Image (spheres, helix red, strand yellow):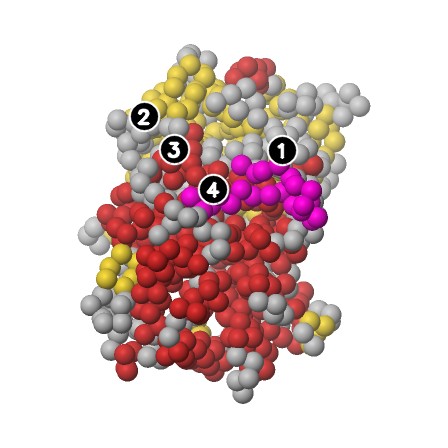
Amino acid sequence: MAQTPSPSNPAGSYPIDTARIWQLLEHWAKASEAWWFDLTDPRGMGHYGSGYNHWGLHTNLKYVAAMTTLATHPDSPRSVDKAHALKRALAAFRFAIFSHHAHTDKSGITLADESTWGRTWITALAIERMMHVYPALLPHLTDDEKQAWKEVLLNEAQYLLHDYKRGPIAGIQANPWAHSGQNDGESNIWNGCVLWRIASMFPDEPQAGVWQERAHQFLINGVSIAADAQDDPIVAGKPVRERHIGANFFDHYAFDHHAYMNVGYMVICHSNAAILHFDLKAQNLVPPASLYHHQRDLWDITRRMLFADGRLARIGGDSRVRYGYCQEFLLPSLLLAAECFDDPYAFSLVDAQLDLIEGEARYSGDGSFYGKRLAHLAQASPYYYTRLESDRAAALSQLLHYLPITQPAQPQKPVADPGYEASLEGCWQEPEHGDVLHRSATRLASVSWHAQTTTQVMCQPPDDGSLNDWQHNLSGRIRFAGDDDNIPSVIAPHRKTLSYSIDTFAGGFATAGRVREGMDLILKDGWKASDLADHDLAYVALPDGHTLVGLQFARTLGKRTFALEVRGLGMQLINDLYNSHRRQIVTQQSQQTLQSPSQRDTQEPLGSTWACIDEKLGLAGLYGAEELTLRRFASPRGGSLYYLRSLQVEEFNWHCQTTTQTFAPRSVMLDAGWAVLSSVDSKTTQRFASQHVEQIIQQDAANGQALRGMIVRGLDQQRYLILAGFGHTDDQGSVLAFSPPAGKWQALSSQKNSDAIAVLPGQVRIWRDAAAD
């Protein structure tokens, strides 16, 4: 944990105990020997990890960074075998130098997959993540090795200047939508960074000035938005608009990277700016003004998506291993936020993330970072496993180099400070991309209509990132024959968001959308179909700071269907090492401890309409089922592709069909309403379930429309009326009206069709009874 602030620190920073970082890195270096490979080359080469191209190359260079830090940093512990660490670092670095395109014809060295590396859109990232140790390596390199590395860098600079392309598209690109193939915000940043770095290292090169201008072009089109096209302020000698190519971010800084709302890659954009910022600072070199383009604006959004325990609140999910990669590179990002963005809680968040890293290292027990949780991944893909290990090692290495030179602009405070959540409170939305979030001291609630699993919803306390997994969370699940649940949705998109609306108000939000289920299905042999059902979903975060109401209505379209599963609610509860594999569950019938992993896959009716988890998160079924159902799993479920699944997850459903069932055309598959209560105990959950719902509203029309809603009393004791318009209709002008009981119903949402209590199809609205005011 953080040490007591010292009067010797004039910036008033929140000190980080670096001894814990050194211990982590030292123990990891010993564990890394299991993945070290010596080569027979007389120059003494070797590599960490697969030695393959792409992430294998990155893995090896990140290993160079970690081992160089242990070998050469003046604060490296005495217990470190520095001579051995340096030997490993130099062997791995030589392997990287001489397997590059610039040298392999002469050196005869290739990577372990017989390829050569370099001259790609992502090569710069591998270089950038190890260059913080290059000054320390220099005294240990021969003149020939120094010259050879220089030639690697110059070769890469010329590629970025003349031949750069990402995929089939040449030149610097930008587009807010990933499906365009041009959403390149993060790679534009790291390519701009490496160009500026090379120009700074070799200012006497004839093209150094040209590289700098090209770097500005990349960086201005990193965190770029549409308004930049008309932006007149001068950056690095030119108006922003003159270098602007396109927007990679939406107007409110949502990032559609990998085709979903990607909080992790927002962090990557920060991290590469941080790496160049601190590396140049350490060498008294001048950073490009374009490096910081919209970085502060983006951080103002990113910081809202961090749990107080240091974990990313990935409101749009993640297609990869949980708590890895992007999570690691939050560490340098936080230092940049402390120094450049006036964030007074950045150091405290670093400390919190170090707690998580230490916890998993203890769990692994062998010095590795992921050796136990990801043991299956080490067997299935050493290539990917060692990549993740080296990510964490490189980020810790950066932390050790950057912390001593970080000068926080504001005195640093712990996240326990009352001002922390207050600084994050309120709504954020991205209407075009379909994302909304409301945060308060007691609830982080969000909905994403372009998530990794198409839809993803969150409602949980903002101080605990270990409660909910992302996969389909609070979205239910409808799956038909031909939909392989082991294939991630980014590869087999069997769902598609058709429409959505978002409305915000003081203390919460209301959002509704329609998802087409059963897209692009194939049955062996020869049958294909698509567009099997429409799934309408509506969510309202009440202004009480605790409650999220969810409404679901699904109906088949024109085909007879075979549904493998139909589930409402679908809350994904993590039950893994971060909570000691134990969850306490209280229901109307019992109290029980869920010890993970389960001995087998089970499905257990709970005999209760409500449940409370660890006296902090409540569930209440409101209509559409008789009892909550708990599904347990023997193998990890947190993740997408089977070998990337890395967390044990328990699943709560309100309506739970998991055997194949036939549905006739235009028949209702799911009609359910429920609530999730954040930061509540079991008594509050039980009281809400039994007393707070005054009326359930269910009206159906002959044309296929449906009105669903309720009158509910929030935990603030206010009465709220919620209405959602569902169902199939081509008449979008029709209005679904309701006559409420006596009261003074005041519309909270801004989408006021009229003074009537009514909604349009595809819309959800909320009113408050102001009679008691």
Q: Is residue 132 left or right of residue 62?
A: right
Quarter of image, res 285 = bottom right
- Tell which circle, 4 or 3, labels the residue nearer the N-terminal end: 4
Q: Main secondary structure of the magenta part?
A: loop
Write down the residue under mark 1. Answer: 416
Write down the residue under mark 3. Answer: 577
Q: x, y (%) of residue 75?
A: 49, 51
Q: Residue extending furthest top?
A: 589
For label 3, the SS is helix
Residue found 32% across the figure and 74% down from its top: 98
Residue 20 disc label: 4
Question: Would you call the spot at circle 2 few (<14 residues within 10 Å), some (14-19), or many (20 or more)?
Answer: some
Task: Using the rendered image of the protein, determine whether residue 53 is visible from the camera's viewpoint.
Answer: no
Q: Are marks 3 and 2 in contact (CB under 8 Å)?
A: no
Q: Is residue 45 left or right of residue 248?
A: left
* Image quarter hosting the C terminus: top right
Question: Would you call the spot at circle 1 few (<14 residues within 10 Å), some (14-19), or many (20 or more)?
Answer: few
Towards the viewer: 607 or 582: 582
